[in-house]
Image: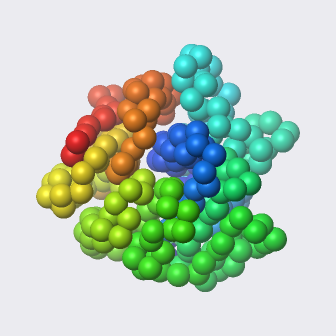
Amino acid sequence: MNYRHAYHAGNFADVVKHVVLSRLVEYLKQKDKAFRVIDTHAGIGRYDLSSTEAQKTGEWQGGIGRLVDAALDAPAAALLAPYLEAVSSLNPEGGVKKYPGSPLIARHLMRKQDRLSAIELHRQDAAKLRALFAGDFQTRVIELDGWLALGAHLPPKEKRGLVLVDPPFEEEGEFDRLVDGLRKAHKRWPGGVYALWYPVKDRKAVAAFRKALVQSGVPRLLDIGFEIRPPSAEPSLDGSGMVVVNPPFTLERELRTLLPALHKLLVVEKPAHWTLEWLAA
Ligand code: SAM
């Protein structure tokens, strides 16, 4: 458990992940009925971009730093507005000094009837998360192995909602755990929306992951790929991806507006591409 998200908060991969998260939550809000967001690897929820960790990598400058004051065309700007509002709510003086993690973005967008379960295994991170949401009766912070939550916590009593699975990928076998976790979770709750994040570092591992997802038999899998540079000689985060299971019917169309706009801002070296592919229809 060496991974600390504070080094990476607000980088290009966070931006893409959190924009997708915001679109999924916005869709759920179209019906009055309450929903639950379950964040299985929640992190600490709020990141200080002037911290030693964030300054050390400066990764946020290639992510939210490029987006925050960018001129966007109207359709992309409208779709990004909920996400950018979540960011600006932490930065009332303008600019971006603080960055919200996934649980805080979901919480910012939720209505009074909706609920959040934020799960984090690292003891100190879970304590920070608990402090962040202290007194918030709509949010439950749980210090737990997020993989277990894919069994025990599903389906939520609201029977509507979204599960974000965003592991650190610091250990071998994380791709396999994602596939197994999804299989197990989907059996318990086939109607849930799942968003599974993955790194594009080892392209063979990514190809095997996609193949295993197809073979899992879980239907309705939309795969988002977002690469910011061609394959590096040494393994490094050249891109990221997200598989959305049971995506809202609006998501593909929205992503065809959002991904090119984000890519234009976030690409580091060409040729590099974004992709959108149904792994299972
Ligand atoms: N989802 C967060 C966001 O977008 O703001 C970032 C999460 S970060 C990539 C992964 C987090 O998972 C880290 O905070 C790490 O401590 C935590 N973690 C690692 N193994 C875990 C496990 N088995 N269960 C729950 N959390 C875990």
Image colouring = rainbow
User: In this picture, is 56 found above or below 72?
Assistant: below
- Side of 187 where 84 appears, left or right: right
Query: Total label count?
Result: 0
Which percent across, then down, holds residue 182?
32, 65
* Residue at 56% in and 72% down: 119
Which percent across, then down, holds residue 173?
27, 72
* Residue at 35% in and 70% down: 188
- Side of 217 where 58 appears, left or right: right
* Residue at 55% in and 45% down: 28
Which percent across, then down, holds residue 197?
40, 55
User: In this picture, is 222 found above or below 197?
Assistant: above
Q: Is residue 259 visible?
A: no
Observer-nearest of 92 and 280 = 280
Which percent across, then down, holds residue 14?
52, 49
Q: Is residue 48 visible?
A: yes
User: In this picture, is 12 found above or below 182?
Assistant: above
Q: Quadrant of the C terminus?
A: top left
* Residue at 42% in and 57% down: 192
Identity of the residue furthest to the right in this view: 93
Observer-nearest of 201 and 280 = 280
Q: Quadrant of residue 174?
A: bottom left
